[in-house]
Amino acid sequence: MAVAEIAQPTQQTLSRYAHMSREQLISALEAHDKTLQSIYNVVHLPNTKMAPGEKLFWVGARCILPDEKPDEDGMVYLPSEKIADFIGMSESSAYRYGRALIDRYDVASKPVP
């Protein structure tokens, strides 16, 4: 009878959270919960408040915008090309939905050179 060898965990098989303390894990879970709740709230808005494409665009924007830095006027570039890649939408559609959100909610905007 053959005996199976049990593989020991390696650095590659360990969770990316394995190094975190209990407090860090709780903090990360609370942040994840906050993000998921925000996404849930957007997805469940009536389509009269935000069209389905606008919802998808905004969920993608939430993930991309933290990497963008404000300019000297405090404005943040809304990279529709990055958002389009992230959500699997054409760049022209992403731009259209982003523009619709800006117009719908009267967000300050300026042309990008």
Image: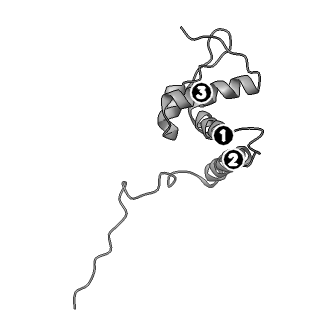
Q: Secondary structure at mark 2?
A: helix
Amino acid type, label 1: Lys
Amino acid type, label 3: Arg
The image quarter in which residue 6 lies? bottom left
Report the residue marked by disc 1. Answer: 55
Report whether 97 appears left or right of 40: left
Q: Residues within 10 Å of mark 3 (few under 14, many from 20)?
A: some
| Residue 112, position as x, y percentages in the image | 57, 11
Q: Nearer the viewer, residue 110 or 33?
A: 110
12 in relation to 35, above or below: below
The residue located at (52%, 40%) in the rendering is: 87
The residue located at (64%, 24%) in the rendering is: 99
Q: Quadrant of the N terminus?
A: bottom left
Name of the residue lying farthest toward the front: 48
The residue located at (77%, 21%) in the rendering is: 106
Q: Secondary structure at mark 3?
A: helix
The image quarter in which residue 48 lies? top right
Report the residue marked by disc 2. Answer: 43
| Residue 12, position as x, y percentages in the image | 36, 54
Give the mark nearer the N terminus: 3 vs 1: 1
User: Mark 3, mark 1: which one is toward the viewer?
Assistant: 3
Mark 2 in CB contact with mark 1 (< 8 angstroms): yes
Give the mark nearer the N terminus: 2 vs 3: 2
